[in-house]
Amino acid sequence: RFHNQHTVTPVSPGPKERAGKVTELSLAYYNAQIPTHVFNMMICSFRYTYRMDLVKHKGGCHCEAVRFEVWSSPDLHVFHCNCSICTKKQNHHFIVPKNHFTLLQGLDNLTTYSFNTHVAQHTFCKTCGVQSFYTPRSNPDGYGIAPHCLDPGTVRSVTVEKFCGEKWEESMQAHKTIRDMS
């Protein structure tokens, strides 16, 4: 059964507020002499939290009954998984944290399929059958977004990385990138 978990309302701070926070972080680095690798991790985390370098993509299913928006980089890092369900539906997806996703319309038009561990929630439009997004097993606190369901104009590039879903447990232990996505 599908649960109402697709609404998020955090608002990105304005450019002035973001600039002030970057300056504060830079001064802290300079004054405290934080090691470079720690500072770089802090900046990456800050940029992701405050949606710097991110764009708002909009998208939806084929019949447009389901519409969403998602904050992500214009340069998408897409996973091509070969697990049983991803192979059947040719699922390519990029992962975002839940607070970067908003369902704009179509909650009543979604249905969910789950199997095996029931962690992954595969959501589909009841009308056209398209899966625009889903809750991945690898990142249950995020969403897997189908890049081919995004409206044109906001994607600059796409990098595809293979993920061996046939050996899911082994792959997750060895695969740092997918664990760090949400």
Image (cartoon, grey):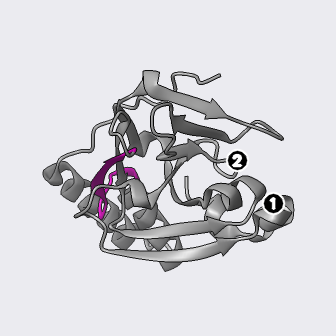
Above or below for 90 versus 60: below
Residue 26 is situated, as x and y percent measured from the top left of the image, at 31, 67
Q: Residue at x 84, y 59 (%)?
A: 169
Would residue 142 be visible to someone looking at this image? no
Residue 24 is situated, as x and y percent measured from the top left of the image, at 28, 58
Closer to the N terminus: mark 1 or mark 2? 2
Above or below for 127 versus 149: above
Residue 112 is situated, as x and y percent measured from the top left of the image, at 61, 32
Residue ID for mark 1: 168
Question: Was residue 50 drawn as part of the magenta stretch in this picture?
Answer: yes
On the rendered structure, is 12 left or right of 31?
left
Viewport quadrant of the N terminus: top right
Q: Residue at x 78, y 38 (%)?
A: 115
Disc ID at residue 137: 2
Q: Residue at x 23, y 45 (%)?
A: 13
Query: Where does the magenta region start and end?
Result: 49-61
Question: In this orientation, which residue lies closer to the viewer: 58 or 28?
Answer: 58
Identify the amino acid type marked 2.
Arg
Tell me the crowding category of disc 2: few under 14, some 14 to 19, or many 20 or more residues within 10 angstroms, Cα based: some
Count numbered badges in the picture.
2
Identify the amino acid type marked 1.
Trp
The answer to which quarter of the image holds residue 109 is top left
Secondary structure under the numbered disc 2 in the rendered image: loop
Secondary structure under the numbered disc 1 in the rendered image: helix
The answer to which quarter of the image holds residue 7 is top left
Above or below for 29 versus 62: below
> Badges 1 and 2: C-beta atoms under 8 Å apart?
yes
Q: Residue at x 69, y 52 (%)?
A: 138
Question: In this orientation, which residue lies closer to the viewer: 61 or 139?
Answer: 61
Residue 14 is situated, as x and y percent measured from the top left of the image, at 17, 47
